[in-house]
Amino acid sequence: MNNNTPTRLYLSEEEQPKKWLNLRAFMKNKPAPMLHPGTLQPATAADLDPVFCKECIEQELDETTELISIPNGILEFYRAYRPAPLIRAYFLERALGTPAEIYYKHEGTNTSGSHKLNSAAAQAFYAKQDGLTSLTTETGAGQWGSAMSMACAFYDLDLIVYMVKISAEQKPYRKALMETYGAELILSPSNTTNSGKKILEKNPNTGGSLGCAISEAIEKAVSTPKCRYVLGSVLNHVLLHQSIIGLECKTAFDKYGITPDIIVGSAGGGSNLGGLIAPFMSEKLQGKSNVKVIAVEPASCPSFTRGKFAYDFGDTAQTTPLIKMYTLGSGYIPSSSHAGGLRYHGMNSTLSQLYHDKLIEARAVVQTDIFDAAVQFAKIEGILPAPESAHAIKVAIDEALECKRTGEKKTILFGLTGTGYFDMSAYMQYNSGAMSDYRPTDEELETGFKSLPAT
Ligand SMILES: *Cc1c(COP(=O)(O)O)cnc(C)c1O
């Protein structure tokens, strides 16, 4: 075992990455193009223009530029909270009795509490540069809305957040945080949009879903002057911004002579995992590394492990461009008993292609196992993780225990995507023994697949 690594692997300001890495540029099998939902032709910049900021569209469609400079206006924001700590989990290694070396990248040190601020800062900066005055978005668990609220406060933009109703009820302090930063919160489904009204007519008591909130936020953006929509995951420009996570890890690892054998990340829409693996996977694609990547998803929303690789909509109202991805169908709504986050029906197209080509693996885990791992980690390493992050913790622990069994000294890196201070109602549910596990039956998944469009 290498016991010479410091507990925190520091980077100086000069050593911090100043370019993002575009993973698609290194792929022989590129992800399939986004399609216009009407014509079924590849979506053009003009198609996307009513919805997204210009620079984000350019980045979304760019699959050849390997490195993209981070503008100074974003770098200065990053410097306020980055580099995120890269920590050797000595306490966890000792508690597990594993010969493995375990490292985690802690993205939860900023006030919004997650990695999502990395893309929120970029998207707000570009919106300001385009001369926009407001943005709309949706938030499920609340981390993305919190990150956008912070970024819009910094870059001086108005923000409307459609928050999934059931999440707002579970997380009242998330809502308060966003409002403190100046965002306007609307609980979704709402009467402020046609798509919200339609869903309420069909199902007045619904707690909402991320897909529905997306429909509402897009409808609001395209019908408001000088306004665009921002999305916190799934899309390739979001993965590009999140590559800062992996680039910082790679720079620090190179400095200390460390090479990861296994990288583990939670997978909701794929942004933190895509960002964490970016520089390591680019080497694997060039034949310079054989790193094993494991995506971890909830058993109740198993896009990779039980989904179909197909073109699908990003939202419930079926208005977005079609994305070729592993998906449960935009009509799939996970069980309301699910408390662990990561409840999106689809997955980023780049990660979907890598999974399809067997360059990454995926595992689905039930939520009581997730919270077991979360509490174990909190007690040993001291940090209270977000339930989403605990998906990665659980599998990193499993891999470290496998090393103990085989005696192999592997180096494991996992993404600690955020802190769980706003998730205490889920922890309370777990602590009281009231948390249950849920695996959808094949029949339940079939109803989601029926919502897949014919292409
Ligand atoms: C949003 C979120 C995730 C999952 O989203 P990805 O786009 O898959 O990264 C994971 N962890 C935390 C803390 C989050 O807020």
Image (cartoon, grey):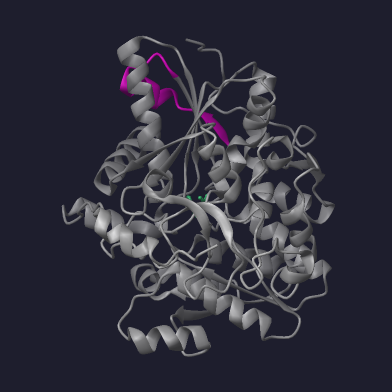
- Residue 89 falls left or right of residue 235: left
Res 154 visible: yes
Total marks shown come to: 0
- Residue 289 falls left or right of residue 67: left
Residue 345: where, in percent of width, then height? 44, 59
Determine whether 120 is above or below 257 in the image: below
Determine whether 255 is above or below 175 in the image: above
Residue 139: where, in percent of width, then height? 50, 67
Residue 444: quadrant of the picture: bottom left
Say if the magenta span includes residue 182: no
- Residue 217 falls left or right of residue 205: right
The single residue placed furthest to the front in the displayed view is 455
Determine whether 265 is above or below 223 in the image: above
Quarter in which the C terminus is drawn: bottom right
Residue 322: where, in percent of width, then height? 59, 63
Q: Residue at x 65, y 58 (%)?
A: 34
Say if the magenta span includes residue 91: yes
Determine whether 410 is above or below 379 in the image: above
Res 338 visible: no
Extent of the magenta region? 85-100
Residue 436: quadrant of the picture: bottom left
Q: Nearer the viewer, residue 297 or 146?
A: 297
- Residue 215 falls left or right of residue 330: right
Residue 337: where, in percent of width, then height? 25, 61
